[in-house]
Structure formats: C-alpha cells, structure tokens
Image (tube, rainbow, N blue to C red):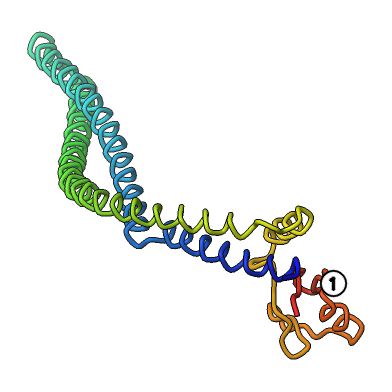
Amino acid sequence: MTQLDLLWEYQQADTEADNMAHSIRQSPKRQKLLKLRDYIRDQQESLKTLENELVAMSDRMDALKDAVSLADDQLKQLQKRVESEPAQTSQQIGQYVAEADQLNLTLGDYEQEIRRVRKSAEDRDRKQRDIKVRAIKSKEEFDALRVEYDQEFKEKSEVLDQLRLAAEEKKKGIEPEYLARYTAIKQHCTPPMAKLLNGQCGGCNMGFPSSVLAAIRSGKQVECETCGRLIIG
C-alpha cells in the first residue's frame, strides 16, 4: 500500500473517533444540562438582584418613617404655637395655614411613596418566592439528568477510547511528513483527504487539469488548490 492509501485508512479511523467525540459534545442530554445550568445561574443572579433591591427598599422605608415622624412632630409644634400664639392678623393666619398646608402636603407625599415602596417590595417578594420554586425544580431536574448523562458519557467515552486506539494503530507505517501534513490540513479542513471522483476533488468538486490528474494517479502528494485537501486517486 502507498503512503496515501495508509493515510486514507487512518483518516477513516480518525474520522470515526472524531464523530464519536462530536456525538459526546452534542449529546441532547448534555445540551439540556448546559441550558439548565445557565438557567439556574440566571435565577441565582435574579435572586441576588431582588435581595439587593429589597434591602434598599427596607432602608428607604426606614428613612420615610423617620421623615413622617419628623413631619408629625413639626405639625404638632405648629398646633401648639397656634394655641399659644393665636393669630392677630389675617397675615399671621395665612402664614399658619401655609405652614400647615405644606406640612400636610409633605406628609401626603411621604405616605404616597410609602405605599409605592410597600407595593414594590411585595411584588419583589412574590417574584423572589416564584424564582425560588422554579430554581428548586430546575435543580432537581438538573441532578436527575446529570446522573443519566454521566452514565451515557462513561459508556461513550469507553467507545471513544477504543476508537482512538484503533486510529493510533492505523498510523503505523505512515511516514511522519505525511502525518504532519494531514494534521496541518485538518486544522482548517475536515476531513483532510478526499477521493478523486470523475476528475474532480471529492471534497469540493473542483476539476483538475490533465497534468494534475496524472500526478494524482501516479500516487504523488497533491493538494486541491481550492479546498486544500490531499487528493487520493
């Protein structure tokens, strides 16, 4: 057998091993596991965000309660001042009324904001509970699927190891320069070799001139100018 014949047999074994490796990477169970993992991570990030928002809202509620307490005290002080220093003129009455209106307006704004913050906190608390429930279910599904995938991975990996060993056996007798060229071509083109079919490259269907065809048929090392594959006659 020529070097190209040996290299072709090696490619068949090498391709079979590569296909098994690809099958392992693209396993539906593995793809679902990755999606579940990413989903669980997203939910964890959402929980952190909600927790931070709830802490900020709690701090804001404390600040609002302090502000309401202060405004209440100011309103009580105003009432005492009105009682101890009754208005003597319409101007003084107007000042008292303006102060009272401003304090009541401020209290109304605070109370309105308290209601908004409380509602937002309740919404986030509900979202937090929902996320936790979904995350628990997803984690249970992930753990169960992981057991199945681990078994599948183990079985396929054993087959892959056997295929890799078989491919290594096919390397025997192939000169290093041919293996090196095969490996280099494989970096950008898979599979690295193609059959000559009806005067064309079996990989990209590029036709060859008669001089190149003669070289291929004589067993020389010829690469397709279009796709870069080694051509075997």
- At horizontal 38% and vertical 61% (from top left) the residue drawn is 27
Vertical order, 44 against 89 (above or below): below
Whether residue 229 is visible, yes or no, is no
Residue 184 image point, x, y percent: 73, 56
Vertical order, 124 against 222 (above or below): above
Residue furthest to the top in view is 84
Residue furthest to the left in view is 83
Q: Quadrant of residue 215?
A: bottom right
Does residue 63 appear to the left or right of 199 in the view shown? Answer: left
Vertical order, 110 against 170 (above or below): above
Residue 4 image point, x, y percent: 74, 69
Residue 18 image point, x, y percent: 53, 61
For the C terminus, give its image quadrant. bottom right
Nearest to the observer: residue 137 or residue 47:
137
- At horizontal 88% and vertical 83% (from top left) the residue drawn is 214
Does residue 219 appear to the left or right of 159 in the view shown? Answer: right
For the N terminus, give its image quadrant. bottom right
- Tell me the kind of residue under disc 1: Lys
Does residue 99 appear to the left or right of 186 in the view shown? Answer: left
Q: Secondary structure at mark 1?
A: loop
Q: Which class describes the residues within 10 Å of circle 1: few (<14), some (14-19), or many (20+)?
A: some
Nearest to the observer: residue 170 or residue 129:
170
Does residue 27 appear to the left or right of 210 in the view shown? Answer: left
Whether residue 52 is visible, yes or no, is yes
Vertical order, 195 against 174 (above or below): below
Nearest to the observer: residue 116 or residue 104:
116
- At horizontal 48% and vertical 61% (from top left) the residue drawn is 22
**Residue placed under numbered mark 1 in the picture:** 220
